[in-house]
Amino acid sequence: MKNKRMQNVLRKNMLLQIGLDLAKHHGYTNVSKYKIADKADVSPSLVAKVLGTAVNMRRDIMRYAIKNQCLSVMAQGMVLRDPKILKLDCDTKNLIFNFIKEQ
């Protein structure tokens, strides 16, 4: 019998991608488990179970943005002085600053 449930890693990556898309279009601080759940067509409690608290969710979305080089979300993190962004190397920070200048 095949397992119909999605694997935890795949589910988390799917929810993080949706969170990243929401952060690009609506702002990093405006992402919530309810918006992610609505877009993913799952319950908010599932999003909370997979991504944790709002603080953990935003931290993971920022890590996912850094991993995928999503400059628009990384720029929001730079403006908000996100600790993950502040720890980046100088070359990456310069990319973010140049992205902000172009906007």
Image (cartoon, rainbow, N blue to C red):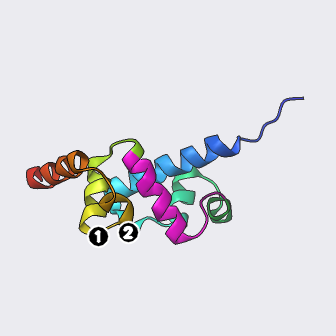
Which of pointers 1 and 2 lies earlier in the amino acid sequence? Answer: 2
Disc 2 marks which residue? 29
* In the image: residue 72, left or right of residue 63: left
| Residue 25 coordinates in the image, percent (x, y) | 32, 55
Going by the image, does 48 lie left or right of 4?
left
Q: Callout 2: helix, strand or loop?
A: helix
| Residue drawn where x is 52% and y is 70% of the image | 54
Inspect the image, locate mark 2, and give the three-letter code of the amino acid beneath it.
Thr
Is 72 magenta? The answer is: no
Q: Which residue position is annotated with label 1? A: 80
Say if mark 1 contacts mark 2, CB within 8 Å.
yes
Camera-side residue of 45 and 65: 65
Residue 87 sits above or below residue 13 on the image: below
Quarter location, residue 91:
top left
At 55% across and 50% down in the image, what residue appears?
15
Which region shows up in magenta? 50-66
Q: In this view, does 101 lie to the left or right of 23?
A: left
Secondary structure beneath dot 1 equals loop
Mark on residue 54? Answer: none
Left or right, 93 with respect to 3, comes to left
Check the picture and name the quadrant holding the N terminus. Answer: top right
Q: Looking at the image, which residue is at 47% across and 46% down?
A: 17
State the image coordinates of residue 100 (x, y, percent, origin top left). 15, 55
